[in-house]
Amino acid sequence: MTQDYEQLRLQLAENIRWMRRIKNLTQEQLALMAEVDRTYVSQIERCSGNPSLMVLCKLANILEVTTDQLLTEPDALRRVLDIE
């Protein structure tokens, strides 16, 4: 089954926003840790930015998930991490 590009962007945005909040990080804190601009994190979370693989890897490492987990369905990620 192929996944739609827009669906993946929405999943990525929701997962990053959710994980960032779980870790009690602001967009600015996450951006500093990932060495990207704060507006870039905001763009990713609003589906207007298109992050590189390198940025996805950095974000995943900071959020303590795998890069592919950032692209999974949000409900599935929550089940895997057992966090509500």
Image (cartoon, helix red, strand yellow):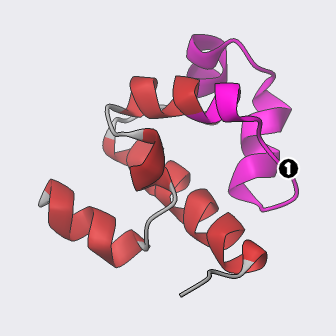
Q: Is residue 80 magenta?
A: no
Frontmost residue, 19 versus 11: 11
Residue 45 part of the magenta-drawn span = yes
Image x and y of residue 31, in percent: 66, 23
**In the rendered view, would you say 41 is above or below 37?**
below
Q: Amino acid at mark 1?
A: Gly
Give the magenta-colored segment's residue range: 28-56
- For mark 1, what is the residue? 49
As drawn, the residue found furthest toward the front would be: 1
Q: Main secondary structure of the magenta part?
A: helix
Q: What residue is at 55 percent from the left and 23 percent from the top?
A: 58
At 81% from the left edge and 35% from the top edge, which residue is drawn? Answer: 40
Residue 20, given in percent of the width and then of the height, sits at 45, 41
Where 17 falls versus 35 (above or below)?
below
Residue 1, position in %: x, y? Answer: 53, 88
Residue shown at 18%/69% (left/top)? 79
The furthest residue to the left: 82
Which quadrant would residue 51 be assigned to in this image?
top right
Task: Describe the element under mark 1 as helix, strand or loop.
Answer: loop
Q: Is residue 26 visible?
A: no
Q: Is residue 72 left or right of residue 55?
A: left
Residue 11 can be seen, yes or no: yes
Left or right: residue 58 versus residue 83 is right
